[in-house]
């Protein structure tokens, strides 16, 4: 039997999802869903559990309570891994390697979006000239852009972006918004955290507010 | 016919489920290539264990006095201990940089089994930090007057014992990755695990030196290595998950 997901099922949904660390509740219980083409903005002050929520959704932390469903099925390593792209504070790239080498390695794990190469993705984020420089010579904002290039290169549907606006200038913030809009227009979805200090382009995006 | 159709169907289902990500072998090759490029960038660091081994082997005859027979008697055991000590410092940093820069997070979310990536890392680590030590063994053997007939047994014992130690070390390194000053912790944890490995390797070398059969201890090492190849990456993967969680 081919088990194609029902088209109506959201890409990612959470039901009564909660997480506690050392018996201290970090967030939740939360209910939300993220459908194809949707962007959800997670807002909250520092320490309100935004990053923890994203790590739980990505599968790096086990949920304390409640359920996460991916494509209508209970999320597991088998159905979620490779379909979720994570961009956190740490870009997941080695400082001694160039952007081309780092992106090449991640493409080796996650595959490549059709028509995308390391070079075209680096051009798109505006730092194509830096592709062969070791990352340690790049500024924090440029490293963030390499992280964005990686999102373009890998084919995952759901983007989990933790503070993608950090370290970026005004053009960089516009770039993040444009990339998210393009990704969602192509059938993807994005969950974005922010401490609320940036202009978020998509005014229709739903918001999840976490209290500290 | 039916079985062919069935296997094609299974293949299609598997492809449908794994629509993103590359095959496990392609991922392993990508990781191996990355680690080798990285090792080449830091070849100065990799040279240190080699230099350490050569210096210790060169100092031994000076400290013990120029008695060729005494040297020949202890050379096998000394070289074994030199290799174990020389590979110890590098074990600590097996996963630390990847934990710090977030690479391990990307490993965890990749479509390939984490244990397979851990095993590939072990292979890359062995190739870059331990294989050079094995390669210079004939030189070090000459410095310590190691009998020529013992050299091949020493090298085979090292080829079995060192991957075993790297596999055991990978689990401990993953466990200790998040801890500060993990080097001391790792050395303390690895010591009891390294003792049987050293005993069997030294047993083979001593037997060869005495002209006795040396196959049995080598076979034990090989059996332990096979067991470790299967089990250590699984334990390592579990430890890496804990390291990323905390």
Image: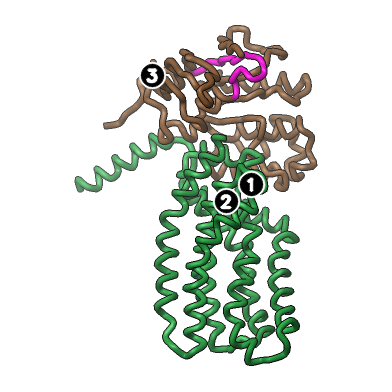
Q: Give yes or no for residue B236 being in the magenta stretch.
A: no
Q: CA–CA distance between discs 2 and 3?
A: 44 Å
Q: Which chain is green?
A: B
User: Which residues make up the magenta segment?
Assistant: A36-51
Task: Specify the farthest residue to the left.
Answer: B2
From the viewer's perspective, is residue A179 above or below residue B107?
A: above
Q: Which chain is brown?
A: A
User: Residue A121, located in which quarter of the rendered image?
Assistant: top right
Q: Position of residue A60 (x, y in %)?
A: 52, 33
Q: Give the residue pinned by disc 1.
A: B96
Point 65% across, 75% down: residue: B136
Quarter of the image that includes the C terminus of chain A: top right
**Could you tell me which secondary element the residue under label 3 belongs to?**
loop
User: Residue A125, located in which quarter of the rendered image?
Assistant: top right
The chain letter under disc 2 is B
Q: Is residue A193 left or right of residue B26?
A: right
């Amino acid at each position: 039997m081919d088990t194609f997901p029902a088209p109506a099922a959201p890409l990612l949904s959470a039901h009564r999802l909660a997480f506690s660390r050392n018996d201290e509740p970090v967030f939740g219980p939360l209910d939300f869903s993220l459908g194809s083409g949707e962007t959800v903005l997670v807002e909250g002050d520092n320490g309100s559990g935004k990053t923890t929520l994203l790590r739980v959704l990505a599968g790096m932390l086990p949920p304390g309570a409640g359920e996460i469903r991916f494509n209508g099925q209970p999320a597991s390593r088998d159905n979620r891994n490779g379909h979720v792209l994570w961009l956190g504070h740490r870009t997941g790239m080695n400082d001694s390697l160039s952007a081309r080498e780092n992106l090449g390695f991640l493409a080796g794990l996650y595959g490549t979006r059709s028509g995308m190469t390391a070079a075209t993705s680096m051009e798109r984020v505006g730092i194509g000239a830096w592709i062969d420089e070791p990352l340690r010579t790049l500024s924090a904002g440029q490293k963030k852009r390499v992280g964005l290039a990686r999102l373009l290169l890998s084919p995952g549907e759901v983007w989990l972006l933790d503070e993608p606006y950090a370290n970026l200038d005004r053009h960089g913030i516009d770039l993040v918004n444009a990339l998210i809009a393009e990704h969602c227009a192509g059938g993807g979805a994005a969950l974005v955290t922010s401490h609320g200090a940036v202009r978020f382009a998509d005014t229709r995006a739903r918001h999840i507010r976490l209290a500290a | 016919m039916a079985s062919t159709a069935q296997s094609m169907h299974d293949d299609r289902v598997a492809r449908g489920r794994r629509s993103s990500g590359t095959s496990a072998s392609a991922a392993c090759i990508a990781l191996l290539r990355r680690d080798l490029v990285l090792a080449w960038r830091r070849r100065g660091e990799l040279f240190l264990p080699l230099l350490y081994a050569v210096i210790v082997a060169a100092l031994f005859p000076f400290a013990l006095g120029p008695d060729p027979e005494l040297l020949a008697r202890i050379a096998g055991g000394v070289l074994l201990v030199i290799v174990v000590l020389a590979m110890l410092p590098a074990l600590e940093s097996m996963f630390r940089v990847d934990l710090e820069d977030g690479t391990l997070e990307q490993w965890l979310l990749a479509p390939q089994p984490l244990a397979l990536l851990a095993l590939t890392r072990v292979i890359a680590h062995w190739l870059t930090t331990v294989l050079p030590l094995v390669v210079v063994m004939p030189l070090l053997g000459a410095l310590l007057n190691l009998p020529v007939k013992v050299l091949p047994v020493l090298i085979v014992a090292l080829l079995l014992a060192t991957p075993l130690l790297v596999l055991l070390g990978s689990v401990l390194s993953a466990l200790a990755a998040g801890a500060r000053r993990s080097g001391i912790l790792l050395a303390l944890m690895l010591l009891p695990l390294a003792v049987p490995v050293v005993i069997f390797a030294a047993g083979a070398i001593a037997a060869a030196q005495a002209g006795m059969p040396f196959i049995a201890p080598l076979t034990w090492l090989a059996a332990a290595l096979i067991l470790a190849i299967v089990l250590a990456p699984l334990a390592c993967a579990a430890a890496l998950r804990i390291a990323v969680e905390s």
